[in-house]
Each structure stands twice: as C-alpha cells, then as structure tokens.
C-alpha cells in the first residue's frame, strides 16, 4: 500500500485505532493531520510519526462542533496543500451507561450521538467540501462497529444506534459522491483491546471473560489490525471499493 504524496485527516488520532492508523498511513507515505480534543496525546503521536521521518500535524478540535472541524480541514490544507483521505474514527462509548433503554437518559443519548453520528456528519461534510473543491476524488473511511450488525447486551443502546446509523450514512455518501470519484467505505471493528473508557465498567475484565469464548480467533483484536484495512481503503489499490461495510472481527459474527 503506497500513499506517497497523499494527505489524510484522521479524527480520534490521539489513541487506539486512530493513532495506529496515523502511524500506518504515515509509514505508507501519507502526511497525516491528527484530530482530537486532547493536545498532549495528539502531539505524542505526531512526534512518533515525525521521528520515523513522516509528516504530521496535531490539531485540537471537537468533531461535534462544525466550526472546529471546518477549521481542522482548513489547517490541514494550509499545511499540506490538499486533502485526499478523511478517516472519521472519533467515537465515544459511555460504558458507565451500559443500560437497557428503559433506564437510559436523554442526555446520554444526545451526548453519544453528538460525537458518533453528528461528529461523523460534520467531519465528512468538511472533508467532502474540500475534496469537491479540488475535483480529484478522494477516499472517506468511517469507523463503525460490529455492534451495528448484531445485538449486544449489556451495551449502551445509544452507542449501538449511532454505529448502525454510520453504516447507512456511509452507503448514502458512497452512492451520492461516486460520480465525483469519492469512494466511501465503512469499517466495523470487532471487540478490541481495552481503551480507558472500559475502566468505567464496574468489572473491566468481565468483558474479556464474556467475549473471548465467542471469538473464533480466541482473542481480542489489536488496533494495529484495523489500521492496515483503513490504509488499504485509502490507497489506489482499493480503487473499485466503495459503499462497502468491512468487518474485522476475528470471526465473531461468522458463527
Ligand atoms: N475498541 C473497540 O473495541 C472498538 C470496537 C469497534 C469500534 N470501535 C470504534 O473505533 C473508534 C476508535 O475507538 P478506539 O477503540 O480507538 O478508542 P479510543 O482510544 O477511545 O479512541 C477514540 C478517540 O476519539 C477521540 N474523541 C472522542 N470524542 C471526540 C470528539 N468529540 N472530538 C474529537 N475527538 C474525539 C478521543 O480523543 P479525545 O478524548 O482526546 O478527544 C480518542 O482519541 C470509535 O469510533 C469506536 O467506537 C472501537
């Protein structure tokens, strides 16, 4: 996979899948704009990329705020001259609200959707406006989840619904912008290694005990196992790939 000369903007790039994707895309030759709310973690990833002779720009922005993500795209173009790929990966899963819907508050529903669904809308809108202005097509990759495809309990139903919405949203964009050469694909990771939000659970290890026996490959996935799929979708080797929903789940849903 060769991304030499390309520019990618990745949201949620300070940790997890986003950070692994930034490192992988930079290794393939792309300049990477790293978007998130925490400057320190973004800077750490940017320094790692630059230490490996890559090009990176840390941009503090909240994807749920139109003005901030618009500015993030503008700063990316100002620094690197253009944009080729948008990875909408930022997401929240409020594990301390893994409650059935009859116990879920409106505030948690709204908070989850503000980042996961509205944040993706705003990220894609800002990125696609730039791609249309350039007129050379491009690639958009949306990170959903396996929970969009199968019922999982206990889990925050606002999260599940937001991830389901991303699949429909991605397909609609794929059809809408195919004529302009903009490919749009959705990646659904399965159960991955723990992120800090899992510490919100009363028993963080219970998740592993419950999930691992259900995964044919017998383990949780690693962030570095999602990053190459996203990098492939950004590359010209995926030139016939659009509107796809790609599962990377260790066989979890094959049962
Ligand atoms: N881990 C899994 O098992 C798994 C499975 C399926 C799907 N996913 C999805 O994969 C994506 C990445 O998650 P991850 O596992 O890598 O977890 P993570 O490390 O928690 O990554 C989420 C990232 O999103 C950023 N973020 C959250 N809200 C934001 C906002 N409003 N604006 C900008 N950035 C924001 C966070 O940074 P700041 O807090 O600093 O902003 C963080 O870097 C998410 O969409 C998640 O739903 C994860």
Image (spheres, rainbow, N blue to C red):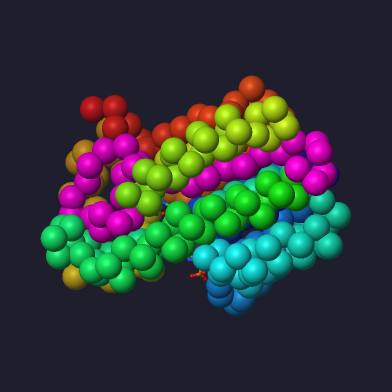
**Picture coordinates of residue 162 (x, y %)?**
38, 51
Give the position of the C terminus as an image quadrant: top left
Which of 255/107 is in front? 107
Segment tinted magenta in the rendering: 132-160
Residue ID at (29%, 27%): 254
Q: Of residues 231 and 117, which is closer to you in this image?
A: 117
Residue at horizontal 56 percent and vertical 75 percent from the top: 38
Give the residue displayed 27% in from the left and 67% down from the top. Answer: 106
Where residue 183 appears, as percent x and y from the top left, is: 64, 33
Is residue 154 one of those drawn in magenta?
yes
Above or below for 151 versus 175: below
Residue 174 % position (x, y): 58, 33
Q: Is residue 27 visible in this depiction of the protein?
A: no
Residue at image location 45% in from the left, 54% down from the top: 117
Task: Return the residue nearer the eye: 122 or 142.
Answer: 122
Q: Is residue 254 magenta?
A: no
Q: Is residue 26 left or right of residue 209?
A: right
Quadrant of res 148: top left
The spot of residue 253 in percent (x, y) is 29, 32
Looking at the image, how many numbered discs can be counted on the residues? Answer: 0
């Amino acid at each position: 996979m060769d991304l030499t000369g390309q520019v990618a903007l990745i949201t949620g790039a300070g940790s997890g899948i986003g950070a692994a994707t930034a490192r992988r895309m930079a290794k393939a030759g792309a300049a990477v704009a790293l978007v998130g709310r925490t400057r320190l973690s973004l800077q750490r990833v940017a320094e790692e990329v630059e230490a490996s002779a890559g090009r990176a720009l840390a941009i503090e922005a909240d994807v749920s705020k139109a003005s901030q993500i618009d500015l993030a795209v503008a700063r990316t173009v100002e620094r690197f001259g253009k944009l080729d790929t948008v990875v909408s990966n930022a997401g929240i899963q409020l594990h301390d609200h893994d409650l059935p819907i009859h116990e879920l508050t409106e505030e948690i529903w709204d908070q989850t959707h503000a980042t996961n669904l509205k944040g993706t809308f705003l990220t894609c809108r800002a990125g696609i406006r730039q791609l249309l202005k350039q007129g050379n097509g491009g690639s958009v990759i949306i990170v959903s989840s396996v929970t969009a495809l199968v019922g999982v309990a206990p889990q925050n139903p606002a999260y599940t619904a937001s991830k389901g919405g991303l699949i429909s949203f991605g397909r609609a964009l794929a059809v809408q912008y195919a004529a302009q050469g903009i490919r749009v694909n959705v990646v659904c990771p399965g159960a991955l290694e723990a992120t800090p939000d899992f510490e919100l659970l009363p028993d963080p290890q219970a998740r592993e005990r419950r999930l691992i026996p259900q995964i044919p490959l017998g383990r949780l996935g690693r962030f570095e196992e999602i990053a190459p799929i996203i990098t492939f979708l950004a590359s010209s080797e995926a030139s016939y790939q659009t509107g796809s929903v790609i599962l990377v789940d260790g066989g979890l849903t094959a049962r």
